[in-house]
Each structure stands twice: as structure tokens, then as C-alpha cells.
Amino acid sequence: MRTLGYAILSLLSREELSGYDLMGRMRERVGFFWSARHSQIYPELAQLEEEGFVTHRLVEQRERPDKKVYEITEYGLAALKEWVIEPPSVRATRDEMTLKAYSIWLADPEEAITLFREQEQKHQEQLQRYREIEAWMKEEWGADLERIDSHHFASYAALRRGIGYESEYAEWCRWVSDSLERGV
């Protein structure tokens, strides 16, 4: 199964979702660290259902076509539980800003400073959004954040990774900008 399938199973392990709702949750909840296009979701759902990892039921709607609501099967949950403890596949990091930094010595320093300050700001803004989500989680979920058998703990663990990433990335951009400014 592709990683996208496991991302879908992760969302369905929390609640039943239509394809449309799944796309929204993908964007809202895991979109900061895993993304998929709309055109990928439905074929993946069909594949997951064909292989027995999910099932669906039809929900009648007024003035709209019926919708399929998907849920994870016991087989899908078992596969997700097995996958979650496997080491991830090694992939090369693809980060355009790091690539730009690798050749920064060729750039106009003032333009490079502007670029890195803008990126620092972007990462600071994302960090602020994560901090707001963290505050909400702490207020809303409280002690559940420390219960390792809770999906709230799992959501918080992923958020903490995002906080660390954005914080470090903003600091790195600041360091590059400050270094360039000292050299000007």
C-alpha cells in the first residue's frame, strides 16, 4: 500500500468520512506534513476498498446525489497498526530554500536577505498558527494529550513535530539573513 493509503486509514481510524470530508480532513489535519490532490483521494479509496481495508455505506441526501461514507475495517486497522511501527522509507529531502542557500554566494546579498527574511516571516506565521492549535488542544483535550492510547496524543505528537520544524526553519532563515547582513 502507498503511504497515501495509510494517511487515509489514519483519518478513518478516527471517524467515518465521505470522500469530500476526507479531502477536507487531509487538508486541515495532516496537510501540514502530508498532502494529496483531490484526484488522488478517490482512486486510493477505491483501491483500499477493493483490498478490504475500508468499506462504505450510502447516505441519502436531499437535493444532492447520495454520498458514500467510508469506514476503516478491522483488516485496515490491523494494517495501519502494523505500518505505524515500521521504519519509514528513506527519501531524499527536497527543499528549495536549502538548495538556494547552497548557491547563495552567487546572489545579490540584498535580494537574498529579502528572500530569507520573507521566508523567516512565513515560517513564523505558520509557527504562530501551530501555537494557537496547541493552545486549543491543551484547553480542549487536557490530560488526553498525555494518554498514549488516545488519538489526541497522536495528533499532538504530530503538531509538536510541526512546531519544532517551523521554529527551526525560521531560526535558520534568520541566521542566513543575519549572516548576509553582517557580510554586506
Image (tube, rainbow, N blue to C red):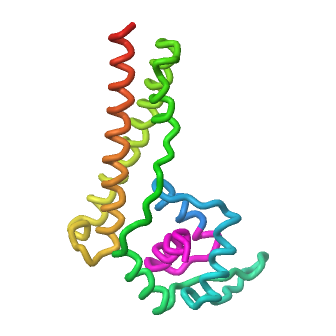
Which span of residues is magenta-colored? 1-22
Task: Please indicate whether residue 121 sits to the left or right of residue 62 in the image.
Answer: left
Number of numbered discs: 0
Residue at 38% x, 75% y is 84
Is residue 54 part of the magenta span, yes or no?
no
In this rendered view, identify the residue nearer to me: 118 or 78: 78
Give coordinates of residue 152: x percent, y percent.
Answer: 32, 69
- Residue 124 lies left or right of residue 153; in this view the side is right
Q: From the viewer's side, name the closer residue of 155 and 88.
A: 88
Does the image show residue 93?
yes
Does residue 110 sit above or below 95 in this rendering?
Answer: above
- Along the horizontal axis of the image, is 147 left or right of 164? left
Figure quadrant of residue 2? bottom right
Q: Quadrant of residue 17?
A: bottom right
The C terminus: image quadrant: top left
Q: Which x, y percent locates residue 67? A: 69, 80
Residue 104 in percent (x, y) is at 47, 22
- Residue 19 in the image: state x and y as whole percent: 64, 73
**98 horizontally vs 53: left or right:** left
Q: Residue at x 62, y 76 (%)?
A: 18
**The N terminus: image quadrant:** bottom right
Q: Is residue 12 magenta?
A: yes
Residue 131 showing in the rendered view: no
What residue is drawn where x is 37% and y is 42%? Answer: 166
67 versus 88 height, above or below: below
Name above or below for residue 166 compared with residue 59.
above
Q: Which is the main secondary structure of the residues drawn in magenta?
A: helix
Which residue is pictured at 59% across the width and 70% down the height?
21
